[in-house]
Amino acid sequence: MKNLFVITLMLTGSLTFGQNDVVIIPKPVSLEMHSGNFNLNSKTTVITNKSAEHVADMLNVYLKKLYGFTLPIKNISPSKNIKNAIILALLKPDERKKDEYNLSVKASEINISGISNEALFYGVQTLLQLLPPEKPTDGNVSFEIPQLVINDYPRFQYRGMHLDVGRHFFDVDFVKKYIDLLAYQKYNTFHWHLTEDQGWRIEIKKYPRLTSVGAYRNGTIIGHHPGTGNDDTREGGFYTQEQIKEIVKYAQDRYITIIPEIEMPGHASAAIAAYPELSCFPNEPTAISDKTPWSGSREGKQVQQTWGVFPDVFCPSEYTFTFLENVLDEVIALFPSKYIHIGGDECPKDYWKRSEFCQKLIKDKNLKDEHGLQSYFIQRIEKYLNSKGRSIIGWDEILEGGLAPNATVMSWRGEKGGIEAAKQHHDVIMTPTTYCYLDYSQTKNDDSLTIGGFLPLDKVYNYEPIPKELDASEARYILGAQGNVWTEYMANPQKVEYMIFPRISALSEVVWSPKDSKDWNTFSSELPGMYKRYDFWGISYFKK
Ligand code: ACM
């Protein structure tokens, strides 16, 4: 095959992408290979109707980014004797699913059809993976694309990837690259974890100290928690509202919804450092153990420099609720997503237990205990967001003390929370640590610092998001699954890429491809083809 490839290249000067080289991730529902090729060259025209022009433009955006050329776009009805064209056909609604596309490659034309632009965009992503993973060296575009017929649609409506920009800040360029990497693999949701103990990353005009104070820490522990020292380097950054609008638009252009996460009531150290009144004990300095390697002052409220779960959390006071409502007003104005993620995880109750104010509130509101108080907190925020036409997602701790009436649960501490929420007829997104935590080590002999755990590629690939404990009527509450990327031990974009690839590709098949067509042997045999594509995308990745 290799020799044949070289011979073809010599004879035609074209980049031939043979049938054996076809690796489409995630695997389509059906793929039928035919003999012969379509030659894509600089004279190939993209034909589309006006309403699908955006998708044609996006094809050119990617051709330019990846190969350095664009194709002419024409708004005409395709005639019978069309030649050398890529036809993007937006069809009238019929029995097809909203995001289902058909792609056929014939000698004279490539035809991508569907009933929504989103569907056509998925077809374009597949087409891009049918092009060779290398640029033409002489600048002369001539790609041989194998003839084939594909029918394809996703298994789950929610196909998510998360990124924690609180532990380490990632700039606008990397966030856009991350969104492209999601789009290539037909993910449709980016869960942007924007606030943390170690950094608040979103500009809020009403509360400028959130970013002037809360977006920076004086240093970071060195090595694995609890750390061997402190790097004594100021770390941080934030996204301005203008940058957020730009990123939201960038994602929309790629049919990706961004769900912002504003953490509450826990993981709030950075916000409290900026506005100490948010704490039940505004005058107490942040509790920092003598053993914690620390940079700079230990006085007053501090942005955290180490990892973990911290007891100084939002006080459920009127001051806090007004603050959060004002913050959420600005968040809502920036993000059109139906969902706002409000966190809810890992909220120690120590400060609430010793706060007279909290104990009185528990009594006055007739709550059972501090878990009841957490439930009161989340339900109040849910009511506020519902009144603005939005819905909340929370980590599975929001089940404790009673679930807010319309909440969607993100099940992370295993599958139990997801099972319980689905049985209560609440929507669920599965992100169990055991299968979906892409910050866990990929190999037992780890070659870099990670948070720990062990989550090899095959385990991600073989994950089944619908727990067997659910019957069919309950299973429909499982909207899909998501990979989580906590960045305590990822200080730069290369490390993020290295940690997520190739596991993000495995997870894309979990959420997109039909359950019955999944096959680990096939997937692993395609890894060399995927590596070539990753190289072409210009990313770091873990190689088995
Ligand atoms: C989480 O990993 N604390 C949601």
Image (tube, rainbow, N blue to C red):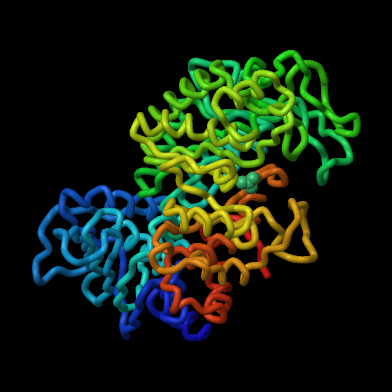
Left/right placement of residue 393 relative to residue 219 reads left
Say if residue 40 shows up in the picture: yes
At which x and y percent is residue 415? Answer: 58, 60
> What residue lies at 23% left-to-right and 58% top-to-bottom?
46
Q: Is residue 214 visible?
A: no
Q: How many marks?
A: 0
- In which quadrant of the rendered view does residue 235 lie? top right
Q: Quadrant of the C terminus?
A: bottom right
Q: Position of residue 203 (x, y in %)?
A: 52, 24
Identify the residue at horizontal 66%, vertical 62% (top origin). 542
From the viewer's side, name the closer residue of 381 and 213. Answer: 381
Residue at 51% over, 64% down:
465
Seen from this angle, which residue lies furthest top? Answer: 283
- Residue situated in front as seen by the camera: 534 or 192: 192
Horizontal relation, residue 312 to residue 397: left or right = right
Residue 413: image quadrant is bottom right
How far across and how far down the image is residue 250, in percent?
Answer: 40, 41
Return the x and y of residue 187 as percentages of the image width and height: 44, 56
In this rendering, the answer to whether 346 lies above or below 473 is above
- Judging depth in this view, the residue of 384 and 436 nearest the camera is 384
Tell me which corner region of the image, top left, top right, bottom left or bottom right, holds residue 59.
Answer: bottom left
Q: Residue at x 67, y 63 (%)?
A: 455
Above/below status of 204 relative to 49: above
